[in-house]
Amino acid sequence: MLNFARLFAVGTGLVSDPGLVQSVSRSGDRTELLKGPLFYVVTLVAATVLCWRDNPAGLIAVAMMCGGDGLADIVGRRWGGAKLPYNSSKSWAGSVAMLLGGWGMSYGLITLFCSLGFFACYPPSAMLGCLGAVALAATLVESLPINQYVDDNVSVPGVAALLSLLLLPQPADMVATAAAAAASSAGAAGLAVAAAAATGAAVGLAGA
């Protein structure tokens, strides 16, 4: 929230901070702080408050925005010579970097949080496929020439979170599945014990 207040104060001109404007904005215009940088902070706060340790959608949204969109900007500036045919401000290199970066970071974060016990563990094969689909959709949205209408720091995490809710099993579903599996295992163990007892009784009767 302190970063939000600082960006808002400098962006609106309430506070003068040329160093912040120079380091955060691309054009040197202080009002730019009220767009992408401010939305970036808002998205991070929203993901943390709403679903950081309760739902993987928050992790995936942050991963696509930071690991995906962030890497796309770095790679695109360095190796972005070949532009997309439908958006000259975006490059093939940047889009590929976003796809792989968002995919990899989201997989890594969910794996970490599962190992720490915050989420029920997801099947790796299913998780990779779902996260790949989310990363591809987020990359396509980021590549569209719509930034003048919707900032990337809103559209990318928004699409990522929505698709994550639709494609990935939610915590309640995972708990129910785990409970059903445990009940099934317990039932199978009970049947095995009963069968062993019956076999032992039959052997005892035969010996008598």
Image (tube, helix red, strand yellow):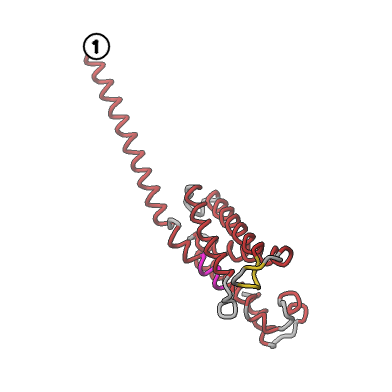
For this view, does 203 lie left or right of residue 103?
A: left
Residue 31 x/y as whole percent: 67, 84
The quarter of the picture where residue 85 lies is bottom right
Report if residue 202 lies within the magenta region: no
Where is residue 184? Give x, y as percent. 34, 41
SS at badge 1: helix
Say whether residue 48 is visible.
no
Whole-percent x, y for residue 18 in the image: 77, 81
Q: Residue at x 56, y 80 (%)?
A: 149
Q: Residue furthest right?
A: 19
Residue sitting nearer the eye, 60 or 85: 85
**Residue under the image location 58 percent in, 63 percent down:** 64
Residue type at mark 1? Answer: Gly
Position of the C terminus, as image quadrant, is top left
Can residue 49 be seen at all in this image of the molecule? yes
Q: Is residue 82 above or below residue 14?
A: above
Number of marks drawn:
1
In which quadrant will I find the N terminus?
Answer: bottom right
Vertical comparison of 97 with 21: above or below = above
Q: In this view, which residue lies farthest toward the front? A: 85
Relative to 148, residue 124 above or below: above
**Residue drawn at x 75%, y 74% as measured from the top left:** 23
Q: Residue furthest top?
A: 207
**Magenta segment, prevailing SS (helix, strand or loop):** helix
Over which residues does the magenta segment extend? 154-160
111 vs 144, nearest the viewer:
144
User: Local crowd at mark 1 within 10 Å, few (<14), some, or many (≥20)?
Assistant: few
Q: Quarter-wise, where is residue 44 in the image? A: bottom right
- Residue 205 picture location, percent across and down: 22, 16
What residue is disc 1 on? 207
